[in-house]
Amino acid sequence: MLAEHWPLLGLRVRLGSLELRPPSDADLAALAALAYDGVQKPGARTFLTPWTDLPPAARATHVVRSEWSSRGDWTPDDWSLGLAVVVSGVVVGMQALRASSFGLLREVGTWSWLGLVHQGRGTGTLMRQAVLHLAFEGLSATHAATASFVDNPAPLAVSRKLGYLDDGITRDLLHGEVVVSQRLRLTRDRWASLPRPEVSLHGLTPCLPLFGAA
């Protein structure tokens, strides 16, 4: 079986009816369909790499190619784990975890998106809680960092709700305009001190060398 050579395919993170898993071909097709239908409201800005501004078919293709690229470029020193977010058996979006030199820095970053029809239901909070459990409990990370545009309040609210603290700003260019992102950071000690739901990890042990976390 392919999972014998790429054990990440067997990784599962579960929180109630929510599951995070590396996307199968069927999951990836569902994610592409969600991207085709839209992941942000007209006029909104979500990502510094503006793939959400692409036409529908190009958005769908971007999701597929990005997942393939992440798998092909994976090394224990530089990796990006894309996880399909599945709620009660339905694929609703993607949650990602990424790191460089994780074995030394023990720091991860996160990004995510949900299909428009699945937003506003609290799923964003649950999927971040699940992936933080993977990072801190499963991989023994010491820091988790993220960033969101200052005019995109929803992900900022999720981060602060989960205990992240402000960590400065970043100024970049998007479509020739200056955009400001709020950086946020969560330490392992702070995460461990806060209330959190029960999350279970399955199939992680054979994956640890791939994360540089063995």
Image (spheres, helix red, strand yellow):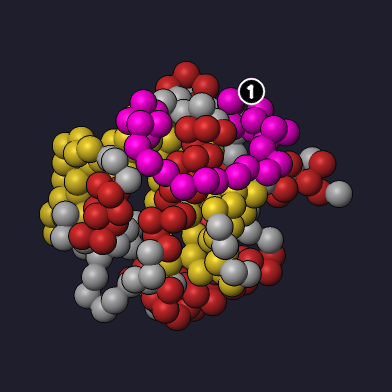
Q: Position of residue 175 (x, y in %)?
A: 21, 62
Q: Which residues are magenta?
A: 188-214
Which image quadrant is residue 76 in?
Answer: top right
Determine whether 49 is above or below 30 in the image: above
Determine whether 112 is above or below 44 in the image: above
- Residue nearer the viewer, 211 or 166: 166
Q: Characterize the local packing of mark 1: few (<14), some (14-19) or many (20 or more) Cα atoms within 10 angstroms.
A: few
Determine whether 80 is above or below 179 in the image: above
Q: Position of residue 201 (x, y in %)?
A: 62, 42
Residue in the image at 56% along x and 33% along y: 138
Quadrant where the C terminus is found in the figure = top right
Q: How many marks?
A: 1
Is residue 130 shown to the viewer in this render? Answer: yes
Residue in the image at 68% along x and 61% along y: 24
Q: Position of residue 127 (x, y in %)?
A: 46, 55
Which image quadrant is residue 185 in?
Answer: top left
- Give yes or no for residue 203 being in the magenta stretch: yes
Residue in the image at 29% along x and 76% along y: 41
Q: Amino acid at mark 1?
A: Ala
- Give yes or no for residue 99 being in the magenta stretch: no
Circle 1 is placed at which residue position? 214
Does 107 sit left or right of 152 as displayed? right
